[in-house]
Amino acid sequence: MSQTCLILASSLLLLLFIPIASSSLPLSSSGSRSLLRALTGGKPAGVDYAVDLNATSFDAVLRDTPVTYAIVEFFANWCPACRNYKPQYEKVARLFNGPDAVHPGILLMGRVDCASKINSDLCDKFSVSHYPMLFWGPPSKFPSGGWQPTEEKSEILAIEVEDARTADKLIAWINKKLGSSYSLDDDNFENEHLPSNISDPQQIARAVYDVEEATASAFEIIFKHKMIKSETRASLIKFLQILVAHHPSKRCREGSAEVLVNFDDLNPPDTWLASEQEAIDNGNAVLGTFRICGKDIPRGYWMFCRGSRNDTRGFSCGLWVLLHSLSVRIDDKESQFAFTTTCDFVNSFFVCEECRQHFHKMCSSVKSPFGTSRDFVLWLWSTHNKVNERLMEEEASLGTGDPKFPKMIWPPKQLCPACYGSNNKAKDRRNEVDWDMDEVYRFLVDFYGKTLVSLYKNKDVGHEVLSGSSEDTVASTNAVVVPVGAALAIALASCAFGALACYWRSRQKSRKYYHQLHSLKNI
């Protein structure tokens, strides 16, 4: 029997890890999750803004950062000139690094200490001949390359000492390079040059970063608030199953699978009485150590979902994009499962009470089961527009909306002219638009499916895996149709998940903490 369980479980695990073909609800964002998140605004004097890099983190951080450019300083901690230069470098790093950066999403500023033995080969790779030495280039070019003084053509440039000697000179050099007008006196977060995600549909390609950020933040909230209870654990398991099969980010699919495999260990379903809450709390704490989208990397920028102020868009937008991206990737046979799972997840884990109740009400109004993925895609789209209609009125009366990104009915005509029929009475209310539902469906599948992941096809991303790190985030394919294997993974959840649970329990018996959690049980 144990061999049968192991075979069934192994088959399902292989199925879950097969690359899946590709085809936004407010929560309160949680605390620090990444290198740049730790570099929060309002820091006391003397606290670093530049990201400390070493031979272990260098490739992963620069490869995975969503910014357009990077500056890396190579220095030695014993060098007096380096110590004197550090405050100058930090003045510039304050403008660009961290979630509260004055100008986020543009430039990552890091530093490498060549006096540390672990970094000797890295510093040699960049031919560091004096301290400090600064290099500029696209972040993805740093892991795969280096710098040689005799090399004529290189996308990594050494910044001349005189051009970077002071903070004023360095920011002037950056402005000349970017054609910008940044100033060291800039201190208010204001995205003056935000690319419009209304007129340019390709902006959604950058939302993969936001979907990863939103996914990780949502699970941080769940673990932090100890929201996994006996009555909510099934909802979370089902949502994890959908993430494993259909999340647009490969590293989030793999991280979700890891959590799913360990879930029954850490949150056993059969605890009783006095031991139940303690076991559940312990499980929440241990699950909180997992990184559902992989190791920590610089985050907090919000690419597609960035608002014109720090307190707008961001997390809630990222969650909506996540739900839409899942909806366009499911198979027809999964549509009802995806609908009920999404509704249960929101009802069980959303900490915004008004949002939760409003969404639950819309879920409860659905009387007939969904038979196709198209039904679910259009229902979620319609639901999102209902939310936007409600928030449009509230934000207009309270003045709390983002002035550059006001709530609107989606999609606007600029993005999908064919979605609008000829008998529209108004442009800003969903129920007054004569929608062409076939065109709306085609637009949603393309926008949240193929276009969402297209950025990765154009990135120069290596496939090296650092020790202890997850793979690069790469969308699986640009296909719209989900393969039969993915649908089967969900369709067979009731029987196959039982086999997987059998396998998990066989592993649990050899784990010390499992016995501790089940001290009152005869396993």
Image: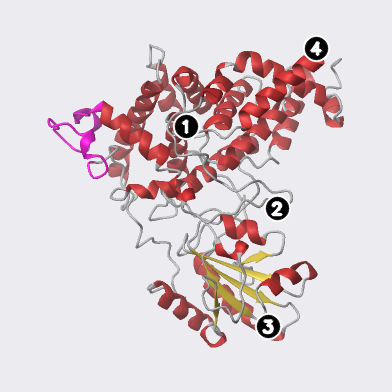
Q: Is residue 443 above or below residue 310?
A: above
Indicate which disc, 2 or 1, sits on the residue closer to the N terminus.
1
Q: Which residue is mark 1?
A: 326
Q: Which residue is mark 2?
A: 466
Name the spot of residue 304 as percent of width and height, x first: 41, 49
Q: Would you say the magenta stretch is mainly helix, strand or loop?
A: loop
Q: CA distance from mark 3 to mark 4?
A: 65 Å
Q: Which residue is mark 4?
A: 1
- Is label 2 in contact with label 1 (beta carbons under 8 Å)? no
Indicate which disc, 2 or 4, sits on the residue closer to the N terminus.
4
- Is label 1 in contact with label 4 (beta carbons under 8 Å)? no
* Front residue of this view, candidates 423 and 233: 423
The C terminus - image quarter:
top right
Name the spot of residue 146 as percent of width and height, x first: 62, 70
Q: Is residue 69 left or right of residue 287?
A: left
Q: Secondary structure at mark 2?
A: loop
Q: Secondary structure at mark 4?
A: loop
* Front residue of this view, candidates 123 and 378: 123
Amino acid bearing label 1: Leu
Q: CA distance from mark 2 to mark 1?
A: 29 Å
Q: Which residue is mark 3?
A: 129
Task: Give the magenta-colored segment's residue range.
Answer: 413-437
Crowd class of label 3 (few under 14; some 14 to 19; many from 20; radius 10 Å): few
Crowd class of label 1 (few under 14; some 14 to 19; many from 20; radius 10 Å): many
Q: Is residue 310 above or below residue 321?
A: below
The N terminus - image quarter:
top right
